[in-house]
């Protein structure tokens, strides 16, 4: 994180000014998340895919790209060991803290069609990373690294995943369009009847204009006229009135605001803590560690608040996949990543703590997907073991 916005910019600034900067940064962070969520939800409707797909591709790619840039720069400047721990730590925070908190706040939607696919990629990429790391350690001992060919392999798998995600999203949309009146394979629930299909409204309006009775079962001409009038007046939700390029601008503009403001916020708070002589180990283990996942957390909370909880689910799953395939892949392609950190205590902490905790959290996530898919919702209690596992990981990391 320190590579994106240098902490030297904040050194020597008086704490009241830093506090004002932190408040302003938090305001921009929330507003940026609002713009991002509105743009992402509108983009999903405009191009005919679900919000889960947009969250797992566009949003997650945007939130992980800055961390990827930081990790690649760290690898190039001789701090390659940071990339591996930071990426796996982000997976643990995303699935344990962010998804766990989301579950506690509301019953998050569980889309069986997409989660049965995206969820397995999420878990499979983590298993692949763990298998490669343990295999490299068994073969090379303390000299084990993730080599450049491994990084290129991960990047190749990333390209396949992104293409598959778009394809799954369009298949999902086609299922809804082809069988609108059947309990669908996607959610297992009957279709919504609260809002008539737009085609029905169009036929009703056509019947009104021609003076004929529209062939809509259970509807009179007057009802058809009323329905058409309502749809004609309300038209589309506000984001859908925009073009795809405008919506993409909202998404990426919101992402820039979220990422930059979150970094400014954390650097400001960290400098205030230093001025009040709070130990550096506490700052690194709490404020900075929490700040790494702050963009995803705020975007997730705003998504729930604005009624787009699918974005949170997709963003968490997509961010987990991208942290493994994108962040670690690009970093390893830039420079071999050492699996053993001689400066850590113990040096094998990545193999003994980070990877096992990641597999436990993602194993719980995979189990919860299997349990929730037919019920179409994640239960709130599922957030408890995820958050507790994350807190246990933080305490064990701090205890070192």
Image: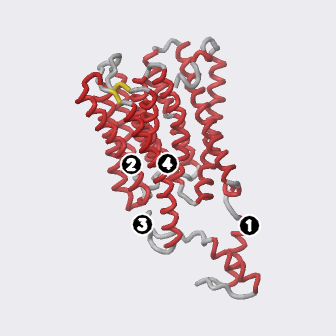
Q: CA distance from mark 1 to mark 3?
A: 33 Å
Q: Residue furthest bottom?
A: 212
Under tag 3, what secondary structure?
loop
Q: How many neighbours does mark 1 have within 10 angstroms: few (below 14), some (14-19), or many (20 or more)?
A: few
Quick one: quadrant of the C terminus? top left
Q: Which residue is mark 1?
A: 233
Judge whether 287 appears above or below 54 on screen.
above
The one nearer the camera, 280 or 73, is 73
Mark-to-mark CA distance, 2 and 4:
11 Å
| Residue behind mark 4 | 56
The residue positioned 48% from the left and 67% from the top of the image is: 175
- What is the C-alpha distance between the residues marked 1 and 2? 42 Å
**Of the image marks 3 and 2, the number of the one nearer the N terminus:** 2
| Total numbered circles | 4
Q: Is residue 364 left or right of residue 23?
A: left
According to the picture, the residue beneath numbered tag 2 turns out to be: 121
Mark closer to the chain start, 3 or 4: 4
Horizontal side, residue 132 vs residue 283: left or right? left
């Amino acid at each position: 994180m320190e590579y994106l916005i240098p902490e030297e910019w904040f050194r020597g600034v008086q704490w009241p000014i830093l506090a004002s900067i932190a408040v302003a940064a938090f305001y921009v962070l929330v507003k940026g998340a609002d713009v991002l969520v509105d743009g992402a939800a509108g983009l999903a409707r405009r191009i005919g895919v679900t919000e889960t797909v947009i969250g797992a591709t566009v949003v997650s790619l945007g939130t992980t790209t800055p961390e990827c840039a930081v990790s690649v720069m760290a690898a190039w400047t001789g701090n390659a060991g940071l990339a591996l721990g930071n990426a796996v730590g982000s997976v643990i925070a995303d699935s344990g803290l962010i998804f766990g908190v989301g579950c506690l706040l509301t019953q998050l939607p569980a889309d069986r069609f997409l989660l049965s696919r995206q969820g397995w990629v999420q878990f499979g990429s983590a298993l692949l990373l763990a298998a490669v790391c343990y295999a490299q350690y068994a073969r090379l001992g303390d000299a084990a690294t993730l080599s450049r060919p491994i990084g290129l392999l991960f990047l190749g798998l990333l390209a396949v995943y992104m293409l598959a995600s778009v394809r799954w999203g369009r298949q999902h949309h086609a299922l809804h369009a082809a069988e609108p009146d059947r309990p669908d394979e996607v959610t297992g629930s009957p279709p919504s009847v609260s809002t008539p299909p737009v085609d029905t409204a169009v036929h009703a309006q056509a019947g009104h204009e021609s003076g004929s009775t529209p062939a809509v079962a259970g509807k009179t001409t007057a009802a058809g006229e009323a329905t058409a009038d309502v749809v004609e007046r309300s038209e589309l939700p506000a984001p859908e009135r925009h073009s795809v390029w405008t919506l993409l601008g909202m998404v990426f503009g919101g992402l820039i605001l979220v990422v930059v403001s979150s970094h400014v916020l954390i650097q400001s708070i960290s400098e205030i803590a230093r001025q009040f002589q709070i130990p550096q180990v506490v700052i690194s283990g709490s404020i900075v560690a929490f700040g790494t996942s702050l963009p995803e957390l705020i975007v997730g909370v705003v998504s729930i608040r604005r009624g787009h909880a699918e974005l949170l689910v997709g963003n968490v799953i997509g961010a987990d996949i991208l942290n493994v395939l994108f962040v670690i892949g690009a970093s390893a392609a830039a420079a071999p990543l050492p699996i053993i950190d001689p400066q850590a205590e113990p040096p094998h902490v990545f193999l003994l703590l980070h990877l096992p905790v990641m597999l436990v959290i993602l194993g719980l996530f995979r189990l919860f997907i299997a349990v929730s898919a037919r019920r179409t919702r994640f239960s709130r209690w599922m957030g408890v073991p995820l958050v507790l596992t994350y807190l246990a990981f933080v305490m064990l990391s701090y205890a070192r």
